[in-house]
């Protein structure tokens, strides 16, 4: 599965250039022209890396950095025309992985993207596999197994399980799960969530009628009971 990159820049021509470059390099690419769209994409698309312009029309990119890098957030490369050293230092202090000034060489940018993704993957190595009961999910390989055998999930089943696995033991609300898995337009469609959860339980629970791994918190949401370390 290729890494997903979110390109955040208000210049449509630069976005097109970056999308073409990254697509040719084999990455999945999503784009945003402002901070609001970027934050929505962060929640829904779960990018592995963000290329962030600082001069956004609705909010300064520096304000976005602490939100973007909050664990388990993506790697972030600031890509901007601002050349002042104090701007670079501030961005790096706020959590950016790298800082590239415009105009940029696309080959060098690709190398910096590869480097940032490697560092990010290494830092997350302890979180990539989450075990629960006799099953586990590999969040990098996007693979779910039970008793050593791969379990085939639908895209929505996988997305729901992956979101719960990112926060094992923590209750995630119905609204949160619906927003992340189905999108903001479906935050009231709780039946979507219930149907998908029933499918997951049939495939992963020892007894789907008495779930112990994928637990319901009545009126609130769901929790994944991960194995103790």
Image (cartoon, grey):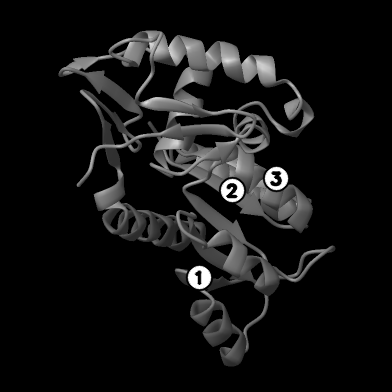
Task: Please state the horizontal and vertical placement of residue 141, each as a whole percent of the image.
Answer: 31, 32
The correct choice, above or below, for 190 with respect to 226 in the image is above
Q: Secondary structure at mark 1?
A: loop
Q: Choose the circle earlier in sequence order: 3 or 2.
A: 2
Q: How far is mark 3 from mark 2, CA to CA? A: 11 Å
Q: Choose the circle earlier in sequence order: 3 or 1.
A: 3
Q: Which mark is residue 40?
A: 3
Task: Please state the horizontal and vertical placement of residue 3, each as a whole percent of the image.
Answer: 43, 41
Task: Please state the horizontal and vertical placement of residue 101, each as a whole percent of the image.
Answer: 58, 74
Q: Nearer the viewer's eye, disc 3 or disc 2?
A: 3
- Per the image, the residue denoted by label 1 is 96
The correct choice, above or below, for 59 with respect to 161 in the image is below
Q: Is residue 11 visible?
A: no
Q: Secondary structure at mark 2?
A: strand
Q: How far is mark 3 from mark 1, CA to CA? A: 19 Å
Q: Choose the circle earlier in sequence order: 1 or 2.
A: 2
Quadrant location of the N terminus in the rendered image: top left
Q: Residues within 10 Å of mark 3 (few under 14, many from 20)?
A: some
Looking at the image, which residue is at 75% across and 71% down?
A: 60
Q: Out of 18 and 181, give the one closest to the viewer.
A: 181
Q: How far is mark 1 from mark 2, CA to CA? A: 14 Å
The correct choice, above or below, for 62 with respect to 135 in the image is below
Q: Out of 86 and 181, give the one closest to the viewer.
A: 181
- Per the image, the residue denoted by label 2 is 6
């Amino acid at each position: 599965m290729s890494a997903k990159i979110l390109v955040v820049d208000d210049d449509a021509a630069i976005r097109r250039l970056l999308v073409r470059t990254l697509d040719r390099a084999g990455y999945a690419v999503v784009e945003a022209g402002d901070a609001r769209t970027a934050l929505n994409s962060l929640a829904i698309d779960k990018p592995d890396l963000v290329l962030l312009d600082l001069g956004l029309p609705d909010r300064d990119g520096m304000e976005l950095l602490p939100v973007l890098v909050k664990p388990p957030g993506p790697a972030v490369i600031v890509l901007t025309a601002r050349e002042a050293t104090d701007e670079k230092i501030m961005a790096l202090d706020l959590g950016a992985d790298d800082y590239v000034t415009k105009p940029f060489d696309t080959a060098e940018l690709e190398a910096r993207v590869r480097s940032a993704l490697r560092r990010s993957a290494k830092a997350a190595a302890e979180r990539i596999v989450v075990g629960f009961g006799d099953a586990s999910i590999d969040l990098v390989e996007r693979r779910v197994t039970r008793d050593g055998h791969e379990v085939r999930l639908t895209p929505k089943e996988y997305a729901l399980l992956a979101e719960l696995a990112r926060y094992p033991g923590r209750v995630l609300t119905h609204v949160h799960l619906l927003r992340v898995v189905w999108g903001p337009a479906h935050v009231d469609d709780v039946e979507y969530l219930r149907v998908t959860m029933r499918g997951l339980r049939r495939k992963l629970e020892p007894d789907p009628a008495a779930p112990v791994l994928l637990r319901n918190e009545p009126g609130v949401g769901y929790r994944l009971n991960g194995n103790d370390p």
